[in-house]
Image: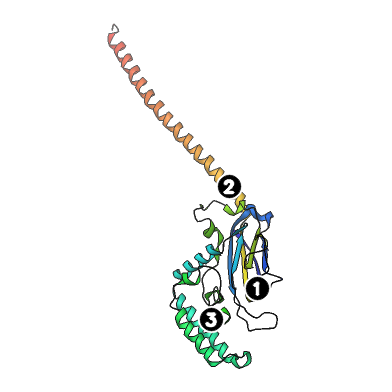
Amino acid sequence: MQHIREESRSITFTRANPEEVFLIGSEHLSFLSDVRLSFWCISTFPTPQVQTSAIADLRVYFNGKDISRDLAGAIAKALDFLAGSRAQYEKAMNRWISILEHESAIIGLSRSMIDEQKRLASEFVKKDWREFFLTLRTEGFGYRGALHPLHFLFREISIPPLSLRDILYPESADDDYPLNSIDDIRLVFANGPSRIYQAGYMPIALQYEGYMYCKVKCVLDDSWEKEMSQRLTDLSLQVANISDQMLELKSTYQEFELRAAEFKSIADGIEAALNESSPR
């Protein structure tokens, strides 16, 4: 049996808060089987505090390493695998553009800007997914980056959560626990290089601010079940060993029976010979 520990957060990136940190509890590492991620960018209208919701350079760090490109590649593969992903993407873009049309007078969007979003949507839906996911960034994909697939993943575009075990340790066996040995328990989301890991860090520019939502699911193997599974494995080995010993004993007994039959036959022959040679 496995237990899921989920943590969800809405993240607002600003120059004062350029990253968000999730802690993968060290007390659970011995039972950590997987970490599964779902995240998406959130479209917003301009405010005095945040002028853009486009994520210019989303970075994700795990175990002290930048895994952004690994995740981007995994997303592209998941979209290729998902039947109907392009239809879902097109529908999501059209829904967003209809919201823009409805709010255009309030936020000051011209008719030509709305028409440009429609043109871009018809162009984007034909793109290879890998063109979107060379990195994790939405800037440059429509008004405020809102036509990038990252705004619709795990919701309108229904790909499954990303498994860090499958992405980072694809060669691991089913009974391996590669996540048990991580040295850095922080999972970090940052807009731009993280100040935690970047030497000579400088605050990011205003256009790199933005919003996103993230779910982190830690998959833990039940400790009691893990112990019982090991005991059952040990017991199975003992039973197999006993079975081998029984087979060996049976073989020895069968050999003894054959030898005994041979000796009896010899003894019967000797007795018959003696009886024939004895004076009557």
Spatial distance from mark 3 to mark 1, Cα to Cα? 20 Å
Point 45% across, 32% down: residue: 248
Question: Which numbered circle lies on residue 218?
Answer: none
Q: Is residue 259 above or below residue 51?
A: above
Q: Amino acid at mark 3?
A: Gly
Q: Earlier in the sequence, mark 3 or mark 1?
A: 3
Which residue is identified by label 3? Answer: 142
Residue 243 seen in this snapshot: yes
The label nearer to you, 2 versus 1, is 1
Question: Which numbered circle lies on residue 230?
Answer: 2
Spatial distance from mark 3 to mark 2, Cα to Cα? 54 Å
Q: Regarding mark 2 in the picture, which secondary structure is present there?
A: helix
**x and y percentages locating residue 92 in the rendered image:** 52, 81
Q: Is residue 268 above or below residue 7?
A: above
Q: Amino acid at mark 1?
A: Ala
In which image quadrant can residue 84 be found? bottom left
Which residue is identified by label 1? Answer: 205
**x and y percentages locating residue 182 in the rendered image:** 62, 53
The label nearer to you, 3 versus 2, is 3
Q: Is residue 91 above or below residue 215?
A: below
Spatial distance from mark 2 to mark 1, Cα to Cα? 53 Å
